[in-house]
Amino acid sequence: MASRTPKLHLSPSVFHRHLMDNTKQKLAYDGGDLRVWQRKLRRKLRELIGEIPRERVALNVRSLWKREHELGFIEKIAFTAEPYADVAAYMCVPRSAEPPYPTMVCVQGHSTGMHNSIAVDLETNDKTIDVEGDRDFGIGCMKRGVAAFCIEQRAFGERSEKLQEQRSEHGCHDAAMHALMLGRTLMGERVFDVDRGIDYLETRGDIDFKRLGVMGNSGGGTISMFSAALLPRLRFAMPSCYFCTFRDSIMSIYHCADNYVPHLYKYAEMPDIMGLFAPGPVVVVAGKADPIFPIAGVRRAFRKLKTIYRAAGAEDRCHLVVGDGGHRFYADAAWPKMLRELRRLRQPGYGITTPMVSSTLA
Ligand SMILES: [Zn+2]
């Protein structure tokens, strides 16, 4: 006797998609008062990214080397974000501009690290290397008269785990999991590093804080967006190959552990998080053939982001650049839009007002 096979829902993703379909995100932008909404969602996001130290320890800046570059001057430094967490970084100052410099904080994604930002080898920083996908952000900035502060993110590059054996192909796995057990997220820790990096920039005296931005690709795009959403000193943002909907990207396609913030989907979608930056000028960069942040989701998310920027009276400060290829940065397409925004700030009568109350994360 032939038995009929019952339809069983055995895959966890089937259930989780069902749950997503039936989740009314409590703090998604609904067309009401923008400032009030931003305050509420930002407070919630600040809570969800986990504990951040209240006390800011001395940066204890150490200079590791300095060198001339054909485009300017580069110094490698280390500073302390919090006790037992030092950050390595390159400060790139362009030859073609005068201080105070427009400046971008640059963050790499899952790669061999920040050495890509200045196109040198990882081990000695002495040999020039070819960098694919326009990920040489520091060089790209200097070429355009913009200073760059290239930060090594936790669990990447020089800050990858060296003491504990890594069994995951993604170096972020253990750090992301351990952070969760400690009431933190790796996301929150990385945003905090950007905030402390800005503390360092404030000690320099040659940075134009009205023209301070953040940029990065992939995992650097992630931190660009969350930093822009949470850090009031950032005035410009250029997240690449990350902005999409959560639903179409990290909630539908395999991504590693550092992409996840506990409970976040119950409250908001990705355009809401980016919308916390409105009316700050943003250039969203995407790849037409990016397999892990699909372009249909990017466009859907961008339409929602536009409505938020429209509510902020800044629809024209919100740009989408779509490159012809995959998961990478598209410098020649993205920079003209960012440079136009940076120049626009110089025009009399224009000033971005920030809705933030406190000037730092903690
Ligand atoms: Zn990861």
Image: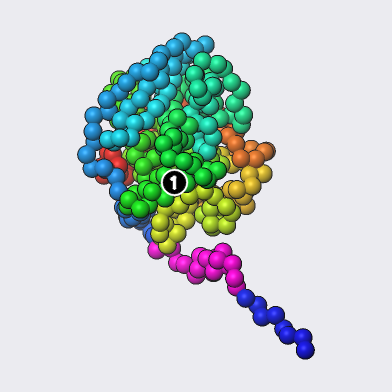
Asked whether 312 or 47 is in front, the reply is: 47
Which segment did they paint magenta?
A: 9-26
Residue 160, compared with residue 13, is above or below; it is above
Which residue is found at the position 57% from the left and 17% from the top? 128
One can see residue 28 in this view: no
Return the x and y of residue 156 as percentages of the image width and height: 47, 35
Q: Which quadrant, please, contains the N terminus? A: bottom right
Q: Which quadrant, please, contains the C terminus? A: top left
Return the x and y of residue 238 as percentages of the image width and height: 49, 36
Look at mark 1 in the image and give the residue it sits on.
Answer: 174
For the rendered model, the colour scheme is rainbow
Residue 259, compared with residue 239, is above or below; it is below
Which residue is found at the position 52% from the left and 38% from the top? 110
Q: Residues within 10 Å of mark 1 (few under 14, many from 20)?
A: many
Return the x and y of residue 291 as percentages of the image width and height: 64, 47
Residue 48 highlighted magenta (yes or no): no
Return the x and y of residue 131 as percentages of the image width and height: 59, 26
Which residue is found at the position 42% from the left and 23% from the top? 90
